[in-house]
Image (tube, grey):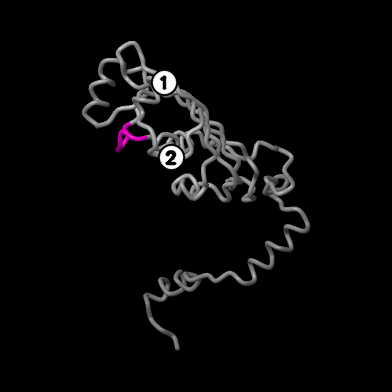
Amino acid sequence: MNFRESGSSTYRSLAQQRAVVSRQLDPQSLPRFAQACGTLDTVLADLTFSLDDQGRVLVKGRVVAEAELGCHRCEEMVPKQVDAALSALVAFSEEQADEWDSITPQTDVVVVTSPNLNVVELVEDELLLALPNRVCIDDECAHKPSMYYGVDGKELVNEAVAERDIEETRRFPFAGLKEAMNNDGEDKS
């Protein structure tokens, strides 16, 4: 069963029908996730609704996003697939979620703002939690910064030239401090 409009069905009716909802989400509908990504291409959600043994709405599924994420190591945009699995009870208030969490603490609970289906509300937090800690896993990346600091503290020839250029332009704000202290702060000009 593929529903086109968010809000066209209630969570409870979907669960009673054991419905499967498949959606391609507009990246602009996920503003927090889009902000965490450099570029967000496609987001596909496949969700199955059912009732648990206590009559609570249960949603299970998978959300896959194709995005470009900024690598913290090489500072390049890296194409990455963000894959999030979802299995949670759907609660309609914080109090209900707290009660259910105290009864079954090992089960995730998602609090929704309306009884009508809103796929974005269900999946955006799961996508944010599924973002990888390390984006670039290629140790031979051409954009990887140099991690070589010379042999025995001595720079390489090319790096020594760059270091010398830095030394020539570096300012030393406290260069005259030692001399001024020796002269007891007297100005000789």
Whole-Å distance between the Cαs marked 1 and 2? 21 Å
Check residue 45 for magenta coloring.
Answer: no
Please report the residue visible at 64 percent of the width from the left and 71 percent of the height from the top: 168
Magenta residues, start to end: 111-116
Pointer 1 residue: 17
147 sits to left or right of 32: right
Front position in the image: 25 or 161: 25
Is 117 rendered above or below residue 152? above
The quarter holding residue 137 reads top right
Disc nearest the viewer among 1 and 2 = 1
Name the residue: 36% across, 14% down: 52
Which amino acid does the dot numbered 1 rest on?
Gln
Which SS class for mark 1?
A: helix
113 in the magenta segment: yes
User: What is the residue that sits farthest to the left in this orientation?
Assistant: 95
Query: Residue 147's spot in the image, x, y percent?
Result: 67, 45
The residue positioned 40% from the left and 25% from the top of the image is 14
Read off the residue under disc 2: 120
